[in-house]
């Protein structure tokens, strides 16, 4: 049986690209001329394709129509879901040539490298603030527009960002990490067994040193304390081969080699991730 090939009857007069439908040729010409006939009714930004406008509107609504059937995580774009699914395979083919960290997607490697270089290519056209990631700029713009598409199902309070999943059901506050939420809840439950001998304040310290018995309110403080107790120095400088008890001390030491405050701040931010 002979295969029938659809004839391309329409050609672009600029680049000679063929199209089978006149509507596709018209869209192509709009892109060539830089035309953006599809404006967003919410923020006024315009797009050359209707699909691009549809994807953009999800920024305002918070809609995430594409869901991973493995872990349930949702995405606003199909390509975001496709990239995410590769993380379940465990394969990491993209390696950072600075710190040797590996990633399953090239785009994630690109984002990671900016933690070393300090590059922030995404700029807010309202206040000129810059960001290393496009989603950071997107979240920031919601502040200017007053958009809060994410709603707490406990107290009904709305947020401009979705990254506040840990909610206090007593005081209706939201937190970015579980530790902050737990510490906050102790305010309500009054679980403060450690009292100041001078003042009247009490404290909750759930992290105990198994060497000397001293207690701390945060796990990272306990870790630093134990390094001092044991003389452990788990953070190593790749340049001078010196060792340090924690990431902060290593970061301060790296400034000697880097000789730049800007690079130091980037390095500290990276090491504390």
Image (cartoon, rainbow, N blue to C red):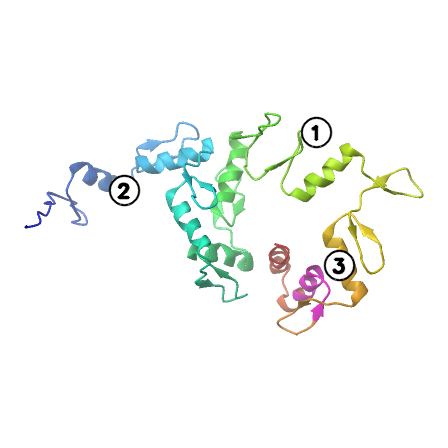
- Label 1: how many Cα within 10 Å (few below 14, some 14–19, many 20+): few
Residue 187 placement, left or right of 269 = right
* Image quarter hosting the C terminus: bottom right
Tell us which disc is closer to us: 2 or 1. Answer: 1
Q: Position of residue 266 (x, y in %)?
A: 60, 57
Say if residue 124 shows up in the picture.
no
In magenta, the rendered stretch is 243-254
- Label 3: how many Cα within 10 Å (few below 14, some 14–19, many 20+): some
- Label 2: how many Cα within 10 Å (few below 14, some 14–19, many 20+): some
Say if residue 239 shows up in the picture.
yes
Picture quadrant of residue 233: bottom right
Residue 272 placement, left or right of 189 = left
Whether pointer 2 and pointer 3 mark residues with C-beta atoms closer than 8 Å, the reply is no
Tell us which disc is closer to us: 1 or 3. Answer: 1
Q: Main secondary structure of the magenta part?
A: helix
**Residue ID for mark 3:** 224
Considering depth in this image, is 174 or 25 the residue closer to the camera? 174
**Residue ID for mark 1:** 170
The numbered mark, 2 or 1, whose residue comes first in the sequence reads 2
Q: Secondary structure at mark 3?
A: helix
Q: Residue at x 61, y 57 (%)?
A: 262
**Residue ID for mark 2:** 31
């Amino acid at each position: 049986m002979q295969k029938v090939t659809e004839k391309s009857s329409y050609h672009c007069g600029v680049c000679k690209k063929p199209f089978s439908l006149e509507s596709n040729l018209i869209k192509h010409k709009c892109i060539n001329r830089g035309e953006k006939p599809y404006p967003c009714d919410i923020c006024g930004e315009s797009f050359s394709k209707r699909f691009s406008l549809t994807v953009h509107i999800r920024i305002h609504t918070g809609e995430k129509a594409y869901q991973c059937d493995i872990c349930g995580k949702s995405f606003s774009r199909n390509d975001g879901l496709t990239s995410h699914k590769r993380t379940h395979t465990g394969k990491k083919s993209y390696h950072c040539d600075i710190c040797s960290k590996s990633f399953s997607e090239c785009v994630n490697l690109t984002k990671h490298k900016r933690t070393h270089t300090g590059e922030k290519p995404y700029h807010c056209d309202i206040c000129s603030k810059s960001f290393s990631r496009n989603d950071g700029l997107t979240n920031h713009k919601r502040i200017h527009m007053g958009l809060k598409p994410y709603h707490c199902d406990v107290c009904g309070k709305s947020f401009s960002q979705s990254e506040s999943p840990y909610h206090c059901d007593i005081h209706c506050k939201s937190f970015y990490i579980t530790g902050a939420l737990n510490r906050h809840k102790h305010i309500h439950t009054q679980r403060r067994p450690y009292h100041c001998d001078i003042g009247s304040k009490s404290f909750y310290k759930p992290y105990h040193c198994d060497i000397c018995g001293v207690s701390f309110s945060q796990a990272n403080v306990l870790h630093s304390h134990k390094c001092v107790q044991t003389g452990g120095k788990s953070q190593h400088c790749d340049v001078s081969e010196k060792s340090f008890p924690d990431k902060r001390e290593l970061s301060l030491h790296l400034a000697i080699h880097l000789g730049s405050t800007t690079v130091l701040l980037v390095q500290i931010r990276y090491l504390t991730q």
